[in-house]
Image (cartoon, grey):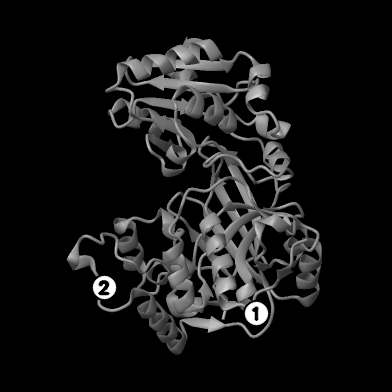
């Protein structure tokens, strides 16, 4: 079961930096050069300065740093500590997080969680699990940054089978420790909870949990590599996580849509794919407003937008027995997963893509909204857009209980957890 510990965090002195809204940033992997400059314009102490130290264009000599960017980051952190901008706690605490957000579908929610340290486990133990297969990621960059700073700077967002929020909510003051609105309009409120009884109760409840990584797989793999590199027992065996209960009413999951290229210039390949779709699915032309299959019932239902004719279609799987034969040996929860059906029957089957093609995104890209998917096909960047339904939380839980991981980008958890609430020492 999960080994969860409270934090003795390094965090901002909000009085020194004029508030959390000046220094918190989105996660490093969603920030471009313009956003980085905007964040640093809010404050030179913004967390992006230490969480994203690398230049954006390695081919531009003018963008190259003088010296080692990771060591420069470590020196910057030391300077901030000397100035009193960053302060280190001397006692244990858990940090509570409430996120008021408007989802991509326009509905309003509040998602709850706690920031804690979690022992780094190999996936084989089953205590901390990935929920989907990951694409190769920038492991070296994150590992170099961890070595230099000896801090977890950006939390991993994970889902817990045990919900700690009911234990911390009664201990929260009316005013949070800090508050910040992210670029998507999500209002993040953060409280430091140091009551020993509450801390002990949270640790005890989470000891019985299984944890499912929702966002931050590469950060977790970095934590495993750093643990193994340092060796022995110590803070390097733990990593910073934001945990949300699977039963939290504010937890929502959205789909990630698939975009295919390489068909416009190969009419024969395109016709083979379309003929295969007609053999495998009931294909019905629909209006653009009906393209999104989110409310549709059944197994293996998709929207399809074809750039060649500008038309929208609804696909409904015709033969579930044939699907089960193709996925023989896989758990039922996996066999009923839209992303697995699309990967097996369409990407690998009809489009002839290999597992390596999918892993390396050769001829494949992803979009987080129907509008973006259509835009990228209409403008000629991609040829076909497959629109997926959201994965119900119950199905996420059911797949997580098996030995299977979902295909890459099966889910899109919104909102992100920001960087800069707390930093966790790992050395």
Tell me which residue sits at (43%, 15%) in the image: 274
Q: Which residue is mark 2?
A: 65
State the image coordinates of residue 188 (x, y, percent, origin top left): 55, 58
Give SS at disc 1: loop
Q: In front here: 349 or 18?
A: 349
Tell me which residue sits at (56%, 46%) in the image: 133
Q: In front here: 321 or 296?
A: 321
Q: In front here: 207 or 353?
A: 353
Q: Which residue is mark 1?
A: 232
Callout in the foreground (1, 2):
1
Give SS at disc 2: loop
In which quadrant will I find the C terminus?
Answer: bottom right
Report if residue 281 is visible in the image. Answer: no
Q: Are marks 1 and 2 in contact (CB under 8 Å)?
A: no
Tell me which residue sits at (43%, 56%) in the image: 29
Tell me which residue sits at (40%, 70%) in the image: 46
Q: Quadrant of residue 18?
A: bottom left
State the image coordinates of residue 257 (x, y, percent, origin top left): 47, 33
């Amino acid at each position: 079961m999960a080994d969860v510990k409270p934090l003795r965090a390094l965090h901002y002195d909000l009085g020194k930096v004029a508030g959390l809204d000046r220094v918190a940033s989105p996660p490093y992997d969603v920030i471009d050069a313009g956003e980085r400059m905007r964040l640093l314009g809010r404050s030179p102490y913004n967390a992006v300065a230490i969480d994203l130290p690398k230049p954006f264009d390695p081919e531009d000599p003018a963008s190259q740093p003088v010296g080692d960017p990771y060591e420069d980051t470590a020196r910057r952190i030391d300077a901030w500590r000397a100035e009193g901008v960053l302060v280190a706690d001397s006692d244990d605490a858990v940090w509570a997080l409430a996120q008021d957000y408007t989802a991509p579908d326009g509905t309003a929610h509040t998602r709850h969680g706690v920031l804690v340290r979690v022992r780094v486990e190999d996936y084989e133990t089953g205590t901390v699990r990935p929920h989907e297969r990951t694409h190769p990621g920038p492991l070296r960059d994150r590992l170099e940054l961890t070595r230099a700073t000896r801090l977890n700077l950006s939390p991993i967002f994970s889902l817990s089978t045990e919900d700690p929020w009911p234990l911390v909510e009664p201990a929260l003051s009316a005013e949070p420790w800090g508050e910040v609105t992210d670029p998507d309009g999500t209002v993040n409120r953060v409280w430091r909870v140091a009551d020993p009884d509450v801390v002990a109760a949270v640790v005890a409840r989470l000891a019985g949990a299984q944890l499912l990584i929702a966002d931050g797989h590469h950060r977790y793999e970095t934590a495993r590599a750093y643990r193994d590199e340092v060796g022995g027992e110590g803070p390097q065996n733990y990593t910073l996580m934001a945990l949300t209960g699977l039963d939290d009413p504010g937890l929502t999951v959205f789909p990630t849509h698939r975009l295919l290229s390489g068909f416009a210039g190969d009419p024969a390949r395109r016709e083979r794919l379309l003929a295969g779709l007609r053999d495998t699915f009931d294909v019905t032309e629909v209006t653009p407003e009906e393209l999104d299959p989110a409310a549709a019932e059944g197994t293996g239902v998709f929207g399809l937008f074809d750039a060649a004719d500008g038309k929208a279609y609804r696909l409904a799987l015709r033969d579930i027995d044939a699907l089960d034969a193709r996925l023989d040996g896989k758990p039922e929860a996996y066999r009923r997963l839209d992303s697995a059906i699309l990967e097996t029957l369409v990407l690998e089957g009809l489009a002839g893509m290999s597992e390596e093609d999918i892993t390396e995104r050769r001829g494949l890209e992803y979009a987080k909204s129907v509008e973006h998917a259509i835009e990228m096909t209409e403008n000629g960047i991609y040829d076909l857009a497959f629109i997926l339904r959201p994965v119900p939380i119950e199905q996420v839980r059911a797949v997580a209980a098996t030995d299977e991981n979902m295909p890459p980008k099966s889910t899109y958890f919104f909102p992100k957890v920001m960087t800069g609430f707390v930093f966790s020492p790992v050395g």
